[in-house]
Image: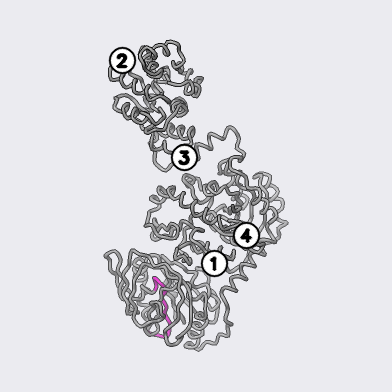
Amino acid sequence: MAKTIMVQGTMSGVGKSLVTAGLLRVFARDGYRAAPFKSQNMALNSYITSEGLEIGRAQAVQAEAAGIEPRACMNPILLKPNSDTGSQVIVEGTPIGNMSAKEYFEYKNKLKPRIMNAYNRLEQDCDIIVIEGAGSPAEINLRENDIVNMGMAEMANAPVILVGDIDRGGVFAQLWGTIQLLLPGERERIKGLVINKFRGDKSILEKGLDILESKCNKSILGVLPYINVDIDDEDSLSQRLEAKNKGPMDIAIIRLPKLSNFTDFIPLERYGTRYVSSPDSLGSPHLLIIPGTKNTLSDMKWLREKGFEPAIQRLAQGNTLIMGICGGYQLLGNNIQENGESIRGMGLLPVNTVMSHEKVRKQVRGRILWKPLEGAEFQGYEIHHGITPRGIPFDNLGGTVSGNVLGTYVHGIFDEGDFCHRFMEYVCSINGIDINAPVQSRREYRDKQYDILADMIRQNMDMNKIYEILENKKSRRFIHVRPEDIEKNSMEIIERELLISIPNENKDVVKRAIHTTADFDYGENLYFSENAVKLGREAIKRGACVITDTNMAKAGINKKRLAKFGGKVLCFMADDDIAKKAAQNGTTRAAAAMDKAAELKGEYIIAIGNAPTALIRLKELIDQEKIRPALVIAAPVGFVNAAESKEMIMECDIPLIVARGRKGGSNLAAAVCNALIYGI
């Protein structure tokens, strides 16, 4: 079984992804087979594995840092935003549909088994798994049904290191405040703190670090310096989109609102790149790139509304080379059709695109057919819904060329092979630019960057302590929780893991039933007649007694709390007269006890947790109008008549709480009674 450690952060952008990649590189260099895992990622930068499945780009980068092949099980859930309020949901590499934020929040708990299946598959092949969280574990509005921070740590039983960003300011408040907002059991999972992106003399921090350690009761595992390392980062917080990289060329990239896979252009940065959001800043670049998009129709409308279309068409009439990749390729064509809607493209390539429900996902190798670069080889991956019959071929994989306008579906085309260097040489040659840039292997360059990151981690983080944390991972049953917090924590876990919505008036009873039995089926199996909980509590407040069919249930009901309202708990099963009456009548003692209950005066609740015969006899007495309880709690357990007796009692016009099916028991009957009492 793999050892596990989880990297969480005080907020988005603190450097979780890079710390994760750095740890993986260190572990790999130390001889371990290490792998990344992120249960849920939200990003427009994705990657296609050799399996033809889609994962977040960050996990592909982390796998590369670890020296292993990226796999879909490293990122079982990927959310790709396609509107301001919704995303395409990709599970284990395959899209399952589009969901609004609300729909996904309600649905995601159903994905826990698939998350753990992916994790378990990964665990079989690894020595160490480094799990990355998302955002912050202290986003208390998202604690319910969490599957990516402490919820994931609990599922994987992972110790956690918490990373804060000092470059943004307030790092002590970040770390201390995050810990304070966690539940006690969650705090216990945090084994140490890391301060990231520090600039300056570490000695200045020492007094603050001592205070932080004391207040949080957590070790400082490291203070990591701000480092300029060229490793792919997440799209939502990337500074690359704001950067203007100087070089011998002017390469302009349109910053589409639904821009995806901007990592395609990292290899071009050394030649001089800039992202453009307005046609006024477009100028006359040597190369203009229309990148991929998660929503082609929406971004075509945006280009038209912003005035980009005529500006791009004018550049096509000049010396600027124009290239569209994936969605950008579609935008350069004549027409785009999707779900019955048709929109005119920019008309610079003689192609039409029809969007398909099927998504193309594959790694590819190819060669250029375009005369200026004929024979140049490339590799990358395709990920698109569109079908675009090509015109004059640009490559052997479906790309098109028309004059100085090029289109291809291949992401990562600049990453490997000799295409990038030859392409840049060609662009420079037609513009009279001399670039004496050496051919550079992207793989070798990235490996060097990963090593720089790993060296920084090893020099500034207490790796001995990290290995101790890995070795000392404790079983969750031994996590220290104060006795007074056990029930509170249990109820919070139940609230978080309930898959269905429970009416507020019944929720206390359902949670108490699950707390007692550890069986979430009671979220669906407990039946409540109208106002049953309210009527039961009103009866208790009036001094109603509780009659039960087992001494076990009697022992489990809080008699002291019940007595405050004047009630008591009765069980007749051991009474001598009940045994005699049962023998005389040829019935069970449980049925005879119901006859005795019918002779009592006053108000009472009947709680049956064992014998179906008690419930059957109670139904007969109710039908004969010989008894009318204030409430019946029907929870007999067993295979013979248990389920049937409950269905029978539900025919009665009295207040009922029923555990439908075969499940039940004295502990459940007592738990329901206690929930009623505690809720008063």
Is 373 displayed left or right of 657 in the figure?
right
Q: Of marks 1 and 3, which one's residue comes earlier in the chain? A: 1
Q: Quadrant of residue 397?
A: bottom left
Mark 4 and mark 1: span between their CA atoms?
A: 16 Å
Report which residue position mark 1 lands on.
Answer: 232
Does residue 81 appear anywhere in the picture? yes
Q: Which residue is mark 3?
A: 495
Q: Amino acid at mark 4?
A: Leu
> Which residues are the magenta region?
317-328
Q: At x 36% / y 31%, what residue is drawn?
A: 643
Across and down, in percent, residue 22 comes to 62, 62
Q: CA distance from mark 1 to mark 3?
A: 38 Å
Closer to the eye: label 4 or 1: 4
Q: Nearer the viewer, residue 168 or 612?
A: 612
> What residue is disc 2 on?
626
**Residues at marks 1 and 2, CA–CA distance in whole angstroms:** 77 Å
**Nearest the camera: 83 or 641?**
641
Task: Identify the element where label 2 is drawn.
Answer: loop
N-terminal label among 2 and 3: 3
| Labelled disc at residue 465 | none
Q: Earlier in the sequence, mark 3 or mark 4?
A: 4
Eyeballing the image, is 216 above or below 352? above
Residue 77 vs 424, above or below: the answer is above
Kindly tell me whether residue 170 is visible in this rendering.
no
Mark 3 residue type? Glu
Residue 678 x, y percent position in the rendering = 47, 27
User: Within 10 angstroms of label 4, few (less than 14), some, or many (20 or more) residues?
Assistant: many
Q: Secondary structure at mark 3?
A: helix
Q: Which residue is mark 4?
A: 23
